[in-house]
Image (spheres, coloured by chain):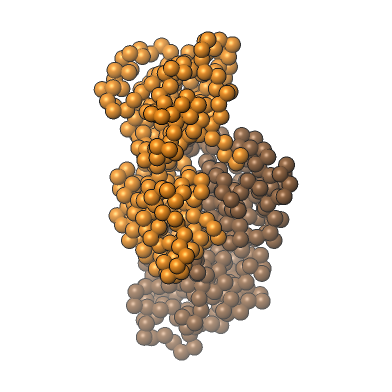
Chain colours: A orange, B brown
Amino acid sequence: MHPFTKNYADSVSAWGEEKLLAAIRRWLGTASPRSPFGIGDDCAVLPATRGRQLITVDPVIYGRHFNDAVPPRAVGAKLLKRNLSDLAAMGGRPTAAVLALTLDARVSRKWLEQFYRGLAASARRYRVPIVGGDLAQADGIVAASLTLLGQAAGPRVVTRTGSRVGDWIYVTGTLGGSLRSRHHYQFTPRLAEGAWLARQAGVHAMMDVSDGLAKDLHALTPRGAVPGLDPTTLPCRPGSTVAAALSDGEDYELVFALGAGRDRRAFERAWRRVFPRTRLSCLGRFVRTNALPAGSLNLDDYRGYEHLR
Amino acid sequence: MHPFTKNYADSVSAWGEEKLLAAIRRWLGTASPRSPFGIGDDCAVLPATRGRQLITVDPVIYGRHFNDAVPPRAVGAKLLKRNLSDLAAMGGRPTAAVLALTLDARVSRKWLEQFYRGLAASARRYRVPIVGGDLAQADGIVAASLTLLGQAAGPRVVTRTGSRVGDWIYVTGTLGGSLRSRHHYQFTPRLAEGAWLARQAGVHAMMDVSDGLAKDLHALTPRGAVPGLDPTTLPCRPGSTVAAALSDGEDYELVFALGAGRDRRAFERAWRRVFPRTRLSCLGRFVRTNALPAGSLNLDDYRGYEHLR
């Protein structure tokens, strides 16, 4: 669905701000509590947190993260799920979100309603109250930026740093072809998996795969080491090549490092018991720079998604 | 300064993502702690809060909130200060912020550096760590959205609701002509004033004036009442008309309701003692709809800033 309308009467600007804000509240429904705990005041008020908090921000922009082929409900859901994936990667669970929307005056109300209804449905499903927002106008733009707050689901958060030479490299699900397969908006953020992994002491570091494994894995790699990846273990999405699995991006899977001293078989058995439907693949291990096993993937041959190219 | 460059070598895209992110860290400097408490992981980690939290989000968009006449350092500062003004209006103080930036690939690095340096200087001044961010590309756009977290500076937060018929209506500073006078980016958010007002039990409700008093005051007005404003008391900025003071917007002043039973003279004396340099004006009081005193301003004759017009 195309977000713009040529018919002024169907546009957001025909309604004006007040009517539009009232409609947004209706579309969000129970996903958005009233002020002071939600939309309608200078700030939203949130209850005190127990323990540390997590915060992340990610947008969806027309022409970048979605196009006319993506249903507007799915765009709203994708906006929330991209942020949930970041939270999952730290072992977090969500607590609240705020939304900043930037719209051309010619955006169609029908498109916007579906966007909000999709966001609201996803917010209810994942129990994330949308507590605040801002609405701004700019020519030629349909962009939404969501800031997500969360907290650790268990006793610790897992960061990208902490892996060591010898650690095993694991990835959830399958990789590649996210655009063609519609995975880029149909994915389910790995919240339960991330929370479980954060409770396993053997998991040294974790992140989500959003710009392609070849690019993202650098951030997980300990100093003086390289990822020794066995190409035959790469979980390619059906129809995807190794190159696509390494470069396409928008996989929203978790990649993590498991301590070399851990019992891999016991770990994998426990995983299959808890997540029988989520594939888990061991891709290899971090090895010293000069000790890459023969037949390993050379990640320098692949590029991930480069922003601002 | 114009944000776009015609010279590819001076553009953000000539640098690419990695170099740009490194530069952003350098420009933010001490205003941005390293991960996990700042930029560089899937989420930023924040310490536990004491008591309730406040959250707000506001953008600056090229062509809307700034143009070539506004120095890029001032654009960065304005972005933070607009959000601080929302926090001030609840009696809050800031704790952390995250930034979502959307840029055309042709944005000049010089412009962006000044933007970040202005944001960083303002963040240091108001002690707001910039803990996270996102960078996205979109054609023809220079837009930044900041989400600000805070907490009550004292024992309570003040909302927009709570004023009663008979309450006195006060406003800080002067109103109108914010564009011409450059006040729209040179203002100082009323954080100290908001925190002090929130500690006065007589202050029933408060908000900041951002879209013009004529529009914003509706949100502060109790049901069944209207604001009875004496036009001679309106603190017009030098060179501003009454109409400008009511309609221009971007004043970033505080408007609040003081209980009818309070000793106004004692309140105003206390104010002058604490804030000798911040003007405070009593504009009138909330009266029943059918009891508007003769000579009062008819706010229906004025419009504030209408978004998505």
Q: Is residue B132 visible?
A: yes
Point 44% across, 78% down: residue: B227
Question: Looking at the image, is A15 positioned above or below residue A195?
Answer: below
Q: Position of residue B27 (x, y in %)?
A: 65, 41
Question: Looking at the image, is A221 positioned above or below residue A79?
Answer: above
Q: Position of residue B268 (x, y in %)?
A: 52, 70
Point 43% across, 61% down: residue: A108
Question: Looking at the image, is B62 positioned above or below residue B133?
Answer: below
Residue at the extreme bottom: B294
Q: Is residue A129 left or right of residue A6?
A: left
Residue at the extreme front: A239
Which residue is nearer to you in this view: B255 or A242? A242
Q: Position of residue B19 (x, y in %)?
A: 64, 35
Quarter of the figure that contains the N terminus of chain B: bottom right
Q: Is residue B40 left or right of residue B9?
A: left
Q: Position of residue B157 (x, y in %)?
A: 42, 57
Point 62% across, 68% down: residue: B178
Quadrant of res B13: top right
- Disc tally is 0
Q: Is residue B206 left or right of residue B75?
A: left
Quadrant of res B271: bottom right
Point 54% across, 74% down: residue: B247
Q: Is residue B129 visible?
A: no
Which residue is nearer to you in this view: A249 or B94? A249
Question: Looking at the image, is B243 positioned above or below residue B129?
Answer: below
